[in-house]
Amino acid sequence: MPEQIIEIAESGRRLSKRRGFIEIYEKESLLGKVSVDDVSSIIISTPGCSVTTNLMDELSLAGIPLVICGKNYLPSSVTIPLQGHQRQFKIMQQQGQISEPRRKRAWQKIIQAKITNQMEVLERAGQTNHKLKQLVKRVGSGDPENIEAQAARIYWQCLFGSEFRRDRNQVGLNAALNYAYTVLRACVARGVCAAGLHPSFSLHHKSARNPFNLVDDLIEPLRPMADYLIYSKVEDFVGELNPDLKQHLAGLLSLEVQAENGIGSLSVATAKMCQALVAYYFGDLDADFTLPMPSPLAYHAS
């Protein structure tokens, strides 16, 4: 699976398609080109850019998300293919017909995996917290006690210090988290669509204004992976993100993850995770649609 991310961070760029390549122009000057087959997503993080309709159609056919970011790298829109998977209608039917108990069990599994991965992050950071070990056991079907939020308060303070507050509108660490989560969100969106799932038919998130509720469900166990990648260079994330730091964060997709079907990059493992969720919708209650933290060596290699 392709893992290259194109980010457009300077105004005045124009993106178009020519003979299987994505071409990037400044006015009439060609700055570079990349094969469509090598690209996993495109992120536009600055105003004043344009994308041709021919390229948007090509991206849709290839299942490549086009992410438009607003302030501090918060995604404001994501394009996805309207169709693609041959079993899409049947899969969407299963999504719509899932029983409430099975939907709640799925969310329970997701939150347990998220907190478990947060525990792993703290272990690697030398910040073991026994309260998280107690909380993960208390996650009930559908997480009625909102253990996820209780764990988050403990987790952030242990990882980044008692003064840290998760605020998506701030720079520094928060902007880095926004950017890394945007990379993950695009990866999950691609996996969801490739598996024939509809990104709006969720397990838990229910925002009427969010067409990616399912994507935001499935990203939860993956967030600690981004957190740890940022923690590994925490002293560098103090102001605006530079190209080197963005490249470091984009390396998330190539981290090696141990999944049910063997070891593979995070982008490949995410695709398999989405396929496993399809199996869960069709009645396989043992389908594993969560991912563990990558090996520490994977982060070191990045």
Image (cartoon, rainbow, N blue to C red):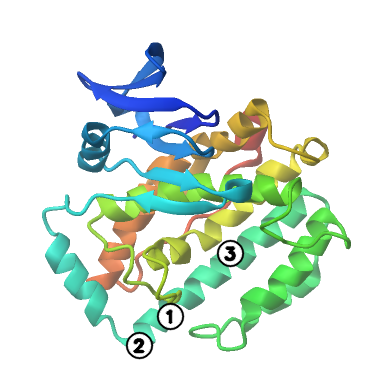
Q: Nearer the viewer, residue 15 or 279?
A: 15
Q: Nearer the viewer, residue 19 or 26?
A: 26
Instruction: Please tell me which of labels 3 and 2 falls first in the chain.
Output: 2
Badge 1: residue crowd in 10 Å (few <14, some 14–19, many ≥20): some
Q: Which residue is mark 1?
A: 105
Left or right, residue 268 beside residue 90: right
Residue 174 image position (x, y, % from top left): 71, 52
Three-letter code for the amino acid on which mark 3 is drawn = Lys
Quadrant of the image occupied by residue 250: top right
Residue with the most extreme top position: 29
Residue 44 image position (x, y, % from top left): 47, 38
Residue 260 visible to an observer of this rendering: no
Quadrant, the N terminus: top left
- In this picture, is 53 found above or below 278? above
Residue 8 image position (x, y, % from top left): 49, 31
Q: Residue at x 49, y 72 (%)?
A: 109
Quadrant of the image occupied by residue 280: bottom left
- In this picture, is 74 found above or below 109? above
The answer to whether the residue labelled 3 contacts the one labelled 1, judged by CB atoms less than 8 Å apart, is no
- In this picture, is 228 found above or below 18? below
Q: Residue at x 28, y 32 (%)?
A: 52
Q: Which mark is residue 114?
A: 3
Three-letter code for the amino acid on which mark 2 is drawn = Glu
Q: Which mark is residue 281?
A: none
Three-letter code for the amino acid on which mark 1 is drawn = Arg
Residue 278 image position (x, y, % from top left): 27, 63
Badge 2: residue crowd in 10 Å (few <14, some 14–19, many ≥20): few
Q: Which residue is mark 2?
A: 100
Residue with the most extreme right position: 162
Badge 3: residue crowd in 10 Å (few <14, some 14–19, many ≥20): many
